[in-house]
Amino acid sequence: MIILASGPAAGGTWSAADLMNVGRTGHSSTLLENGKVLVSDGFNYEEQFYFDDFIGEWVFTTVRVTSTITELYDPATDQWTVVSGINPATHGIAVRLSDGKVLAAGGFGSSGLYDPVANSWTSADPLLQSRENHTTTLLQDGRVLVAGGSYLATAEIYDPSTGDWTATGSMTVPRQRHTATRLLDGRVLVTGGWHYDGTQTNYNSCELYDPTDGSWSATGSLSFERVYHAAAILHDGRVLVAGSVATPEIYDPIAGTWSSIPAPQVYRGQPRLTVLQSGKVLVTGGSKSSAEIYDPATNSWSSAGEIGGSLSEHSAILLSDGRALVSGGGSNFSAGTGMPPIPSSHESFLYSEDAGPLTPFEAAAAAAGLADDNALADATPFNDGVPNLLKFAFGLNLGGPDTRRMTPGGTAGLPTAYLHEDGGTFFRVEYLRRKNSGLSYTPRKSTTLASDSFSVLTGTPVVSDIIGFPDWERVTVDEPYDPITTTKLFTVVEVTLD
């Protein structure tokens, strides 16, 4: 399948990336700690010609071939490279472990571990049960939950610290082609799927797995039965489900209920959902060549342009740099022709979301020449020990040196000034400062508002802790004051970045 990227799209831009070494459909893509993407498993529909002795003619057909080759994509160089060795888990679903390795589990019971340092696979202990079309979910404690598949309701847990698989509670019904999404509170939401026991049953039911006790419990049901659908957790903790039917739904984990949202511009049977850095969701495939964007803030859809070609069972993943990588995919049958399946695609594409207007903090970081990790709020790129966000809060030039004056306002963190009587009359100044911040705080006074008339207060600062805020302290300075001789007194606190 030849796919042509469409270039600029509403809200972002598509561009062609390097070709994969192997065409793939139904594969796993896993983002590694080093920013590269590991692509494993999947299958390819390969075109073949053979001579049919019975009819005495050459015949064209397409054969499904399972891929045993694993590849790495490097966004920095835009290159795919083949990994040595074979993934032991045929049809396994991959997930990155807390130690950076990748576990591929399932597909006839086998499992394997990929080590990004050694750039190679090793066999891991087999699952307790052979399963395919299951789900694999990394839990908050680092263990891995594998659930359902192959008409099973059972689930099992992989413990990376021991390398062992153990049984855990079973789902309420057997499921395959369902979704499993880890919620912010650590529970796992399973939705939809289907089962076959002589007749096919499609599910709209959903359930929650509690890793603290290994139990499953029912939660709100979808409005529609769904199979071959997709799910993604939004930045606010809700879960978006789309595909199988035209109307997407959103799950509220606090209420345990689903609500329908407006339908996208086109129906997608087997889409892929990628949550972008902005919190918007890129929706691709579903046997469609177009892409769309869902914005949770406005509960609306917009076009994300044309990738070209009809994508189905491809892979889509968010890269460390904020771009989305879409790779492979194919089609079970040539649309509307009755011809054999279309060969799986070797191609991959990158979607770059428009940055939009900079926030004030982002503008300050850009003005200081900061980018990537150095532009993060808690970064200290100038080796002065002062985080970017703290400098920004005081209006300081992030690159320093700089000085700003805080004037009394009475709100948290700002100085307050008032008369205080305790064995005399004092002009008291109070302010908050971050402990060991690397910033210098100097309270000053003046009888006028002239900028150069402020002198340093002569009183001794008294420092006290703030309950509940261990990183901050309160500073109080008392200055002797005679209201008869001094009718007006102004104060500021200078914050200096050396």
Image (spheres, rainbow, N blue to C red):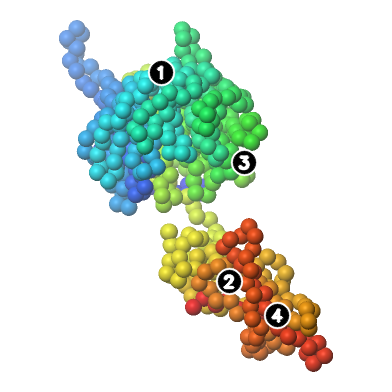
Of pointers 3 and 2, the one earlier in the residue sequence: 3
Left or right: residue 393 versus residue 123 is: right
Q: What is the C-alpha distance between the residues marked 3 and 4? A: 55 Å
Which amino acid is tagged 4?
Asp
Give the quarter of the figure containing the N terminus: top left
Q: Residue furthest bottom?
A: 485
Q: Secondary structure at mark 2?
A: loop
User: Which residue in the structure is indicated by mark 1?
Assistant: 150
Mark carried by residue 325:
none
* Residue sitting at x 29%, y 52%: 77
Q: What is the C-alpha distance between the residues marked 1 and 3? A: 36 Å
Q: What is the C-alpha distance between the residues marked 3 and 2? A: 35 Å
The answer to the question of whether label 2 and label 4 lie on touching residues, with beta carbons closer than 8 A, is: no
| Residue 490 in picture, x, y percent from top left | 72, 83
Q: Residue furthest right?
A: 484
Of pointers 1 and 3, the one earlier in the residue sequence: 1
**Which numbered mark, 1 or 3, is in the foreground of this view?**
1
Mark carried by residue 395:
2
Left or right: residue 70 versus residue 417 is: left
Residue 383: which quarter of the image? bottom left
Residue neighbourhood size for the residue with mark 3, other residues' Cα within 10 Å, grouped as few (<14), some (14–19), many (≥20): few
Which amino acid is tagged 1?
Ser
One can see residue 458 in this view: yes
Residue neighbourhood size for the residue with mark 2, other residues' Cα within 10 Å, grouped as few (<14), some (14–19), many (≥20): some
Q: Secondary structure at mark 3?
A: loop
User: Which residue in the structure is indicated by mark 3?
Assistant: 299
